[in-house]
Image (spheres, coloured by chain):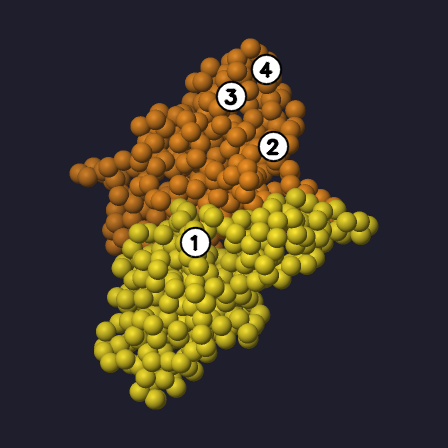
Chain colours: A orange, B yellow
Amino acid sequence: MCEIVASIPLAVNENLIIQKRRIQNGKSKTRLSLVTGTHGDELEGQYLAYMVGSYIDEHIEQLDGIVDIYPALNPMGIDSITRGIPMFDLDMNRVFPGTKRGTMVEVICSSIVDDLSGSDVCIDVHSSNIFLKEIPQIRISVPTAETLVPYAKMLNVDFVWIHDAATVLESTLAHTLNSRGTKTLVVEMGVGMRITKEYCQQLFDGVLNIMKELGMWLGETSPVRDPVISEGREVGFVNSDAAGIFVPYANFGDHVRQGDHIGDVVDPLTSKVVERVLAVCDGMIFTLREYPVVYGGSLLARILQPTKGGDAE
Amino acid sequence: MKKKILFSLKSPYREQLDIIGFRFGHGKKSLAIVGAMRGNEVQQMYVCSRMVQALKKLESEGKIAEDTEILVVPCVNYYSMNIGKRFWTMDNTDINRMFPGYALGETTQRIADGVFSKLQGYEYGIQLASFYQPGIFLPHVKMMDTGFTDPEIMKDFGLEFGIIRKPRPYDTTTLNYNWQVWETKAFSVYANATDEIDVKAADEAVNAILRFMNNRGIVTAKTPPGYITEILNEGKTKQIQSEAAGLFFRTAEIGKTVEHGDVLGMIYDPLDGELVAEIRTPVSGTVYFAYNNPLINAKTVCFKIIK
């Protein structure tokens, strides 16, 4: 059953509508919410929403609970390939929790939060932007790690990144829901403006698994992988210092040693290598630049260091 | 006056980005003024260019106080200005959401860091700011309430209103907020327009900044008399939202004193021309912000009233 979560009249003959689909079966009221499309250039979640919804439809008798799918929190952004909300300066994920008496975006954010609150688990699916490709991972702030890591391990991701809390992130959907007691996991995977079917399949298996763990899925599930947890490890950032075209020599998921040659920044005008890009530490490359044009500062890779005294996994 | 490059960034395909600063006087770092941080902040750049002219004249007349240095940075992001974008050319990030910056971080973090390193240590900081919605403001000065800057100082600008804003989480990465964290008394001056030049409002902003500098002993400058500034919290102003969507016509101008129930604007159906809403003020006061786009969505802030 499709429902409208929020609706605001637009200037000319149209409403901005936020929709969800509720799939319900059995007696249990256990509720899992799958939410995506906050950033209009992140599309991995679109295919995942389709996969989860269509599979449950075909095996509805195996469901004992409620699955709510919110495919597009920012439908105008997706429609116009705009990361933020068109004609609005702020990133939508910096406006939560919103307010009922606020502006259009604040009212929408408030309605979304009200609707999602009370879910037993909420999965907020993001892709990377168009510049970077990310291994399937869950990002958790330190204060929520104790509660969320057990659930993150159920989702069949490769990596769980526990990061410091920043004031600016207090305006995210995940922070808002977690602070209201709705356990919310933020997934990052793939690359902007594209669908990576293998990652969607991987997370699909994770969604069914977490439903099984919550007691709301009676059907078969696939075994899930044991993710690398960042706790006790550092993340090395490789940023370009030169401007030009980035050509990687390492692959996504490679284990590298500090000083390894992982790419070049080249100048197409002078045909010179303007920067030899070296790994800043030992570890596994879990983020790699997709978009070749770089400025000084452009992020080229992130490397997860091994535990102190241990080997890179 | 010394014209200096404060920060440079190489581009793969364009001439190097050189962020220019103009220094006046010498000695103790007294005041830094920053203009366009976004590519459409033409009015903000224009006000700074006028400040450069005014300070050149004051310097040549020996009217800058001894042991005083003033820095003016008219335009941080001219790369975006030259291609008609508001935010950073490549990744669309907002430099004014990257402070205090990070020298080893992403491109706009590096720009913010490069500029901020040159803006630190001043006793006062003034940013020519713009609003995230299309609209016009009564020229006013605003500060973020971090507990560091005394709001009473806003009176030295002699603008009609000085507004105190309670920072939200997303404000914590702006220049204004971080200036205060690094112990610069920081103010934002709103000079009405953004992507077009309003000469009258620019005159008012230039006079307000010169008045501030005169009152703070930074320069000796004659300016027209200002207002006795009313200081108030932003939360105490009344925000009026559109209840309907359509074509927007403003009937109340900024600066106008209005009474409870007065009509401030009309919204018409864009297709059949029927009147769909009258926007009336629920309070008496002065209009200090007005939306100025012909198309309006519902729940859009179309007026702000100082009660």
The vertical placement of B31 against A97, above or below, is below
> Callout 1: 10 Å neighbours few (<14), some, many (20+)?
some
Inspect the image, locate mark 4, and give the three-letter code of the amino acid beneath it.
Answer: Asn
Q: Verify CB contact (< 8 Å) between mark 4 and mark 1.
A: no
Disc 2: which residue: A5
Is any atom of residue A198 visible in this view? Answer: no
Q: Verify CB contact (< 8 Å) between mark 2 and mark 1.
A: no
Is any atom of residue B68 visible in this view? Answer: yes
Inspect the image, locate mark 2, and give the three-letter code of the amino acid beneath it.
Answer: Val
Disc 1: which residue: B232
Task: Specify which label sits upstream in the sequence, 2 or 4.
Answer: 2
Residue depth check, mark 3 versus mark 4: number of the one nearer the observer: 3
Q: Which mark is residue A25?
A: 4
Gap between marks 2 and 4 measured at Cα: 21 Å
Disc 3: which residue: A31
Q: Chain of mark 2?
A: A
Gap between marks 2 and 3 measured at Cα: 16 Å
The vertical placement of B54 against A247, above or below, is below
Q: Chain of mark 4?
A: A
Gap between marks 4 and 1 measured at Cα: 55 Å
The vertical placement of B224 against A99, above or below, is below
Inspect the image, locate mark 3, and give the three-letter code of the amino acid beneath it.
Answer: Arg
Same chain under badges 2 and 3? The reply is yes
User: Residue A205 at what x, y percent from top left?
Assistant: 48, 26
> Callout 2: 10 Å neighbours few (<14), some, many (20+)?
some
> Callout 3: 10 Å neighbours few (<14), some, many (20+)?
many
A82 sits to left or right of A221: right
A309 sits to left or right of A253: left
Task: Specify which label sits upstream in the sequence, 2 or 3.
Answer: 2
